[in-house]
Image (cartoon, grey):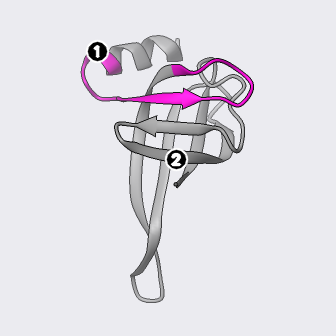
């Protein structure tokens, strides 16, 4: 069911296309919800940007820390991988290279 929701969102132009370059599997293209929000502290002093992508867990099977994500000309390392909601979705936290 969650895969169908993400497919509909991709067709509607609501998702971003990224390239997952795994250390153990062949690379593949994913359609993900992409978020970049400022991480702040001390009276809203921006100390960095929190970058996450979310998608169906079935698409993220095997993703691990240290894998690379490419979006356009930007590259990121996978920093953290978490199952969310009932485990049907995965949220991946990224670090810029």
In the drawing, does residue 47 fall left or right of residue 60? Answer: left
Q: State which tag comes first along the sequence, 2 or 1.
A: 1
Q: Which residue is mark 2?
A: 76
Residue 77 versus residue 46 in the image, above or below: above
Seen from the viewer's position, the closer of residues 1 and 61 is 61
Q: Nearer the viewer, residue 81 or 84?
A: 81
Q: Residue at x 47, y 88 (%)?
A: 42
In reply to whether residue 25 is colored magenta, the answer given is yes
Quarter of the view holding residue 91: top right
Indicate left or right for 28 with 84 as reference. Answer: left
Residue at horizontal 34 percent and vertical 37 percent from the top: 72
Label 2 vs label 1: CA separation? 25 Å
**Label 2 Cα neighbours within 10 Å, binned few <14 / some 14-19 / many ≥20:** some
Taking the image as shown, residue 53 lies to the left or right of residue 79, namely: left
Most distant residue in the bottom direction: 42
The image quadrant that residue 73 belongs to is top left
Residue found 50% across the figure and 14% down from its top: 3
Q: Which residues are magenta?
A: 10-28
SS class of the residue under badge 2?
strand
Give the number of marks: 2
Up-down relation of residue 66 to residue 27 (above or below) = below
Residue under pointer 1:
11
Q: Indicate the position of residue 87 as horizontal and vertical percent values.
A: 68, 29
Residue located 33% across and 21% down the image:
9
| Above or below, comparing residue 78 to residue 20 in the picture | below
User: Picture coordinates of residue 1 (x, y %)?
Assistant: 52, 11
- Marks 2 and 1 in Cβ contact (< 8 Å): no
- Judging from the image, what secondary structure is the residue with disc 1 in? helix
Q: Position of residue 64 (x, y in %)?
A: 72, 37
């Amino acid at each position: 069911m969650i895969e169908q929701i993400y497919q509909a969102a991709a067709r509607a132009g609501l998702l971003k296309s990224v390239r997952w370059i795994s250390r153990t599997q062949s690379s593949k293209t994913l359609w993900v919800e992409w978020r970049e929000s400022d991480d702040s502290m001390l009276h809203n002093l921006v100390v960095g940007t929190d970058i996450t992508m979310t998608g169906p867990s079935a698409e993220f099977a095997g993703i691990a820390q240290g894998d690379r994500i490419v979006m356009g000309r930007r590259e990121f390392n996978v920093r953290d991988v978490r199952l969310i909601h009932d485990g049907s979705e995965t949220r991946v936290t990224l670090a810029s290279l």
